[in-house]
Each structure stands twice: as structure tokens, then as C-alpha cells.
């Protein structure tokens, strides 16, 4: 069913998606570049277009704690944050996933201090990969809006019951205006029914939550949590298909391959960078180069099977990281390599680190990355981890 | 206060049911008395939130759940934030007639939980926040908190040749909370259970945020015999080192203004944590007490 088209920023699209999802409570603390999300949601609560409570918490730690309290009585919670705020929430991120509270949170990907920097990179959410949250990375404002709605469907699935983080590249996506189709409320209501759960404090059936479990059963409980995340892939794929059937937009589930079928080399990228890479792929294909793009949508659960299927067929795989795990390599690179190590014959892999602290990732950067990959596929030796777009010489 | 006033609860009328039972707290635990009595006053329709503390450590060990009403453990810094989420979530769902009640210790309130508590009071969320004050981090093995009194020895404020134990007086939580313009705040002691239960009842009538600070003895951490636990919590009030007061409608009120204090030395010397104190240390404590009471009597009577 077609919705209404409107010209909004990524942040505004998130707020619209959250409004359509009808959360009972929004608990949030402002941080650049997430602020527009909470400003718009405050507007919606004030003008009555969203029937929810807005809790003005005094920190991100409390934003997440309040969201857990909301979820603990069976209500739907929404919050949003970025960078330092996400790091401040860290205790609550582990807590919410262990408690199996299906909270949905938008995160505006932003560099982490020091040095201070309000612009985009993915160190914040990538450093939280192990917190037990589903993590999706979106490419444009439409996908941002759509994924907030899908997030609740997936997170609240009784087989999943896992909190969900929707990541948007700071400024490049949060503050860029695009034409977005806003689906009708009644269609969203039919797609996303009210949250029903037994994982709640209930006056009719009192119970204790967030309990203490010693060495006797702790391993088993953490195993269940792990399997819920692993199996979330089924819900992710099913919800993606159903969403496409209803709203006309399919995103491919865990990953989206672009011109990978006959590719010699591919680049794995996330978020807005995938959009730039797609354009470069088309241009280089015109020139006769067999290049492709692997857009990684979900990083948790990690698309092991899909990465192996697509990247296992090519000669060289580049991984673009807007992140560096100091002393090792980019975090996504580690994850992709881990997946590919399951193959009998692993393709050559190279890591391209750049775009930190809002440094632009240009078409030229990506062309140059593909050129390096093609050379590597042709047998030219390359450094495994390369920083691109540097203004100074590197020691490599 | 638009809710109807509940009937007075006393030893004859108190609820026979137990909502916090079969836990693993030490014998004579004052904190467990505070939780037990509060839940008896409030009844079965409650959502309790406790951070990492003794009461959560002894009450939620799977599969032996000690709360028969709803209860949940919060991250240490965020009792008030999680409790607020519970209360606001319940309101958003249209759940009526339930109390959202927090039980945090002195460290969980005056130190790590202070920011979240301030936020909850500022929002005027409909919660009852109870600080059970046993004057140190007891769950981790008796370390100093912001509410450890002057002269108390703890494992992080050892008394020796150079220091008398803790060198700072208790942080003034009651007035810090009152300074927010909170709807209702009170101080109590488990040594005066009637007064405590009456104040819980009053807190239950409040439309907005209520804070109750209850002095709750810890035989293990204080070095007193378990059977003297309630007595020592009463003696703290009788010697003037603790006080019973309320704050509502913007005014403080002293509920108990003894003409004469029982000797401070008798209170202190019965406890292992104060046994090392010299007469000069005790004189310092008496001076601190007198200065506090002079101010309270001048401003709150």
C-alpha cells in the first residue's frame, strides 16, 4: 500500500518510524547527531500525534534503565543515542539483552572521544557488538524509517526477545534530507501488533525478573540467549519478506549483494558507504571490471552463511571499516574473516580503514580500493590493513 | 493526595501475608525488616526494584525467589531510573492501583544512584523510593559509603594510629532530596516500626515521588549481636545520632524531639565498628550531633 511521500532527514525518518510503531514510553537523553529524533518525538507527544509518555531522563544510563523498566511491565520502549551516550549505556546494553527486553534503539554512528569529534564513524556501535543486541546498519532515510518498524517485529518475536539497535551514519545520513514514503498508520498497525509477552512483571502472575543465576545454570541461560540471537536470522528474513509484500520494499534481510554473481573482487561495506560503493561498482563495470558490493546490513547476528556464499566465490574481498580496533584491524574485517575461515578455501581478504571522525569517503577512495583489490586478485602483494584517504604518510 | 487515607496499621492489623520470605539475609538484618514491613503495608499489588545490594543478593537466587510479589534487580546506578520506567510504563498501559517501590541501600542511593534518583524526583515520577541505610557497602564486605558516619571503621576506612575510621560525617540525603521540592520525604528507623509503617502508608498516598530513608542496622557490619539489631536502630534515634522527620508541602517537621538524649557513648561502645573511638572522637561526634539538632530545632519545629 502506498504511503505519503515527504522530504525529511534521516533523524526525522527515524522519529516517524518510531511514531508509527506506537511505543508506550520514550526515554531519551539528547546527544548530537541524534537530537533531532528526540526533538521530533517530543513534538509528536506534545501535538498528540503520538500517544506516548516522554521521559526526560538525566543520562543515557538512565535512558536505557528506564526503557528496561518500561519493558519489564510489558510496555513498548523506544530510545535513541549516539557515541559517548551509547558508551555510557554499556552496562544497560548487556543488561537489557540478558533480561530479554525487546527495546528498540536508534544509534547515530559517531566517533568516540578523545579527541572529541561529533562526526560519523562506527567505533561506537562496533565496540558494542558483544552486548547481545541485534545490530542493523541502514543506508538511507527510507530504510531507517522502515527498519524501526521491522525492529519491533523482530525484537518482540517470542523466539527472539532480543533488543534491537538501528544504526545510521552520523550527519551523512542523520542530517541529509531525502524523499521518504511514510506508510499509513493502519497498515503499520496490521503489520506490527501490540507487544505480548510473558517476560514481564504482572500483577495477576507475579514474578521476579533480572534474577541471580549462579554457576549451576548460568551457562545454560547464556546459551539460550546466544541461540535466540543466532535464530533471529529466521525472523529477520521472514519479516523482510513480509514487509516487502506489504509495503513494497525488500531489503534482502541479512545482506544485500550487488553485482556479485560474476564478480572477481567485492567490497563489503555498511550504511551510507554502501550507497557510494554501488555507484562506483556501476561505473567500474562499465569499464569492464568485474567488481561487486556486499552490503552488510546486520552485524549481529552476523551473516556468516551469506558472507560465505557471496564472498566465497570471488578472488579477493575488501572490507571497508569506519573503525579501527587499535592494535589489530577494523572490527568488521575481523568478523568477515571469521566467517570466511569456515570455508575450505578462503578468498584473499584486505582491510580498508578510513572515514574516521567524519572524513568523507569519496567515489575516488572506493575506486582506488577496488583497483587495489583487482591488483591483489591478480597476484600483486598488498598490505593487509590499509588506511585510506590519509593526509600523511603511513608506515606500511 | 487524592487517594483515600488507609486505615492505620499496627501489630494487630498488619497483613499476615509475607511478600519477602525465605531469603538468605544474615540473622538480625535490618534491611530485610525494612523490605518486609514496607511490602506488608503496600500489599500484593507492587512492583519492587532493587539494585545490586544485600536484599537483591539474598532474594533472587534462582530458583529460590524470595519475593512473592513482582520484583526485579536493577543495575547498581539506576534503581530510580528503572523504577521510573516501571511506574511510567504501568501508567501508559493503564495499570491502576499498583505501587512502584524501590529498595536501595545507602551506597546505592547516596553515591552511585544519586543522579538517577535526582532525575526521578525532578520528573515527579509516581514512585516510592526507600533507602535502607546500614551505613556502608555491606554486600561487598563493609566498605565506606557516603552515608558511613564519622568514626566508623570499615574495610576501606580502617581505624589505626593515624585515622579514627571514616573521617567525614554522613551525606545529608534527606535534605538533598527535600531540596528538589519532592512531594514527600521522611526519615525512619526500623527501631521505630510503627513510625516507619505510618510513613510508608503516607508515601502510598502521595501523587508523585516519595522518598523514605530508613535507618536499618546491620549486625554483621556493625559488630552487634543479632538479637540487639532492632534495639540498636532504636538507640541511634534515642541518642540523637539519627532523627525522625518529614518533609511535605515544602516544610520540614521533626517527628521526635527528645528533651534529653541517651548517652552517645553507650550507643557507640556497643558496636564493634566504634569500639576503637577515644573520648575525644566521641566528643567530636557529640558536637556534630548538637550542631545538627540545633539547626533542626531552629528551622524545623
Image (cartoon, coloured by chain):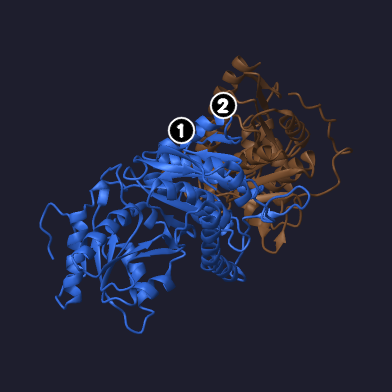
Chain colours: A blue, B brown
Please tell me whether residue A366 is drawn above or below residue B146 in the rendered image: below
- Which residue is under mark 1? A39
Q: Which mark is residue B280?
A: none
- Which residue is under mark 2? B175
* Observer able to see residue A205: yes
Residue in the foreground of this view, choosing between B200 and A231: A231
Q: Is residue A340 left or right of residue A348?
A: right
Please tell me which residue is depicted at 21% across the width and 54% down the height of the picture.
Answer: A363
Q: Position of residue A301 (x, y in %)?
A: 47, 64
Q: Position of residue B297 (x, y in %)?
A: 62, 18
Query: Mark 2 or mark 1: which is in front?
Result: 1
* Observer able to see residue B158: no
Element under disc 1: helix
Please tell me which residue is depicted at 70% across the width and 28% down the height of the picture.
Answer: B206
In the image, farthest residue toward the bottom = A344
Residue in the foreground of this view, choosing between B138 and A353: A353
The quarter of the image holding the N terminus of chain B is top right
Q: CA distance from mark 2 to mark 1?
A: 34 Å
Please tell me whether residue B97 is drawn above or below residue A149 in the rendered image: above
Quarter of the image where one finds residue A26: top right
Q: Position of residue A24 (x, y in %)?
A: 61, 41
Residue in the foreground of this view, choosing between A242 and B285: A242
In the image, farthest residue toward the right = B12
Q: Is residue B65 left or right of residue A100?
A: right
Amino acid at each position: 500500500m502506498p504511503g505519503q511521500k515527504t522530504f525529511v532527514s534521516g533523524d526525522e525518518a527515524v522519529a516517524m518510524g518510531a511514531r508509527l510503531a506506537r511505543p508506550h514510553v520514550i526515554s531519551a537523553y539528547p546527544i548530537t547527531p541524534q537530537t533531532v529524533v528526540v526533538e521530533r518525538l517530543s513534538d509528536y507527544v506534545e501535538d498528540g500525534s503520538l500517544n506516548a509518555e516522554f521521559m526526560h531522563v538525566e543520562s543515557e544510563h538512565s535512558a536505557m534503565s528506564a526503557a528496561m523498566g518500561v519493558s519489564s511491565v510489558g510496555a513498548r520502549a523506544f530510545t535513541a543515542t549516539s557515541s559517548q551516550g551509547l558508551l555510557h549505556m554499556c552496562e544497560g546494553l548487556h543488561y537489557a539483552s540478558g533480561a530479554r527486553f525487546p527495546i528498540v534503539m536508534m544509534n547515530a554512528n559517531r566517533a568516540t572521544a578523545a579527541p572529541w569529534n561529533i562526526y560519523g564513524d562506527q567505533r561506537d556501535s562496533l565496540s558494542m557488538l558483544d552486548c547481545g543486541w541485534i545490530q542493523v546498519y541502514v543506508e538511507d532515510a527510507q530504510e531507517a524509517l522502515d527498519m524501526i518498524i521491522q525492529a519491533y517485529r523482530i525484537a518482540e518475536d517470542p523466539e527472539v526477545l532480543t533488543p534491537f539497535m538501528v544504526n545510521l551514519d552520523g550527519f551523512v545520513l542523520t542530517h541529509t534530507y531525502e524523499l521518504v514514503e511514510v506508510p499509513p498508520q493502519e497498515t503499520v498497525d496490521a503489520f506490527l501488533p501490540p507487544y505480548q509477552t510473558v517476560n514481564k512483571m504482572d500483577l495477576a502472575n507475579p514474578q521476579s525478573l533480572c534474577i541471580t543465576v549462579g554457576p549451576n545454570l548460568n551457562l545454560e541461560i547464556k546459551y539460550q540467549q546466544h541461540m535466540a540471537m543466532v535464530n533471529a536470522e529466521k525472523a529477520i528474513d521472514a519479516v523482510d519478506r513480509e514487509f516487502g509484500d506489504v509495503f513494497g520494499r525488500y531489503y534482502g534481510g541479512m545482506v544485500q549483494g550487488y553485482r556479485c554473481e560474476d564478480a572477481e573482487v567485492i567490497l563489503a561495506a555498511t550504511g551510507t558507504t554502501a550507497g557510494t560503493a554501488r555507484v562506483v561498482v556501476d561505473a567500474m563495470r562499465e569499464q569492464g571490471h568485474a567488481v561487486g558490493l556486499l552490503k552488510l546490513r546486520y552485524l549481529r547476528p552476523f551473516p556468516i552463511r551469506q558472507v560465505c556464499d557471496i564472498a566465497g566465490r570471488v578472488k579477493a574481498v575488501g572490507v571497508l571499516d569506519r573503525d579501527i580496533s587499535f592494535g589489530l584491524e577494523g572490527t568488521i574485517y575481523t568478523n568477515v574473516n571469521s566467517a570466511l575461515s569456515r570455508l575450505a578455501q578462503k578468498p584473499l581478504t584486505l582491510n580498508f580503514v578510513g572515514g574516521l571522525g567524519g572524513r568523507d569517503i569519496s567515489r575516488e577512495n572506493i575506486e582506488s580500493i577496488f583497483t587495489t583489490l583487482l591488483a591483489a586478485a591478480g597476484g600483486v602483494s598488498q598490505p593487509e590493513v590499509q588506511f585510506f584517504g590519509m593526509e600523511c604518510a603511513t608506515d606500511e | 493526595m487524592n487517594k483515600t487515607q488507609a486505615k492505620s496499621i499496627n501489630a494487630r492489623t498488619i497483613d499476615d501475608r509475607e511478600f519477602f520470605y525465605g531469603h538468605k539475609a544474615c540473622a538480625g538484618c535490618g534491611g530485610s525488616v525494612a523490605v518486609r514491613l514496607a511490602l506488608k503495608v503496600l500489599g500484593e499489588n507492587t512492583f519492587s526494584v532493587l539494585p545490586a545490594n544485600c536484599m537483591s543478593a539474598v532474594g533472587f537466587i534462582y530458583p529460590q525467589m524470595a519475593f512473592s510479589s513482582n520484583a526485579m534487580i536493577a543495575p547498581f546506578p539506576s534503581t530510580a531510573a528503572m523504577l521510573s520506567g516501571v511506574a511510567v510504563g504501568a501508567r501508559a498501559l493503564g495499570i491502576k492501583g499498583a505501587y512502584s517501590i524501590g529498595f536501595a541501600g545507602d551506597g546505592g542511593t547516596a553515591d552511585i544512584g544519586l543522579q538517577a534518583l535526582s532525575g526521578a524526583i525532578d520528573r515527579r515520577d509516581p514512585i516510592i523510593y526507600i533507602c535502607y541505610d546500614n551505613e556502608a557497602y555491606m554486600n561487598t564486605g563493609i566498605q565506606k559509603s557516603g552515608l558511613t558516619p564519622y568514626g566508623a571503621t570499615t574495610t576501606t576506612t580502617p581505624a589505626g594510629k593515624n585515622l579514627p575510621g571514616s573521617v567525614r560525617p554522613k551525606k545529608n540525603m534527606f535534605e538533598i532530596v527535600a531540596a528538589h521540592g519532592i512531594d514527600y520525604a521522611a526519615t525512619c528507623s526500623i527501631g521505630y516500626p510503627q513510625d516507619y509503617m505510618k510513613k510508608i502508608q503516607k508515601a502510598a498516598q502521595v501523587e508523585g515521588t516519595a522518598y523514605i530513608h530508613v535507618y536499618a542496622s546491620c549486625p554483621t557490619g556493625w559488630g552487634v549481636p543479632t538479637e540487639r539489631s532492632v534495639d540498636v536502630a532504636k538507640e541511634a534515634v534515642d541518642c540523637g545520632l539519627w532523627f525522625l522527620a518529614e518533609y511535605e508541602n515544602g516544610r520540614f517537621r521533626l517527628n521526635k524531639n527528645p528533651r534529653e538524649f541517651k548517652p552517645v557513648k553507650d550507643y557507640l561502645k556497643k558496636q564493634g565498628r566504634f569500639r576503637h573511638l577515644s573520648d575525644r572522637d566521641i566528643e567530636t561526634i557529640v558536637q556534630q550531633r548538637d550542631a545538627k539538632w540545633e539547626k533542626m530545632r531552629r528551622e524545623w519545629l
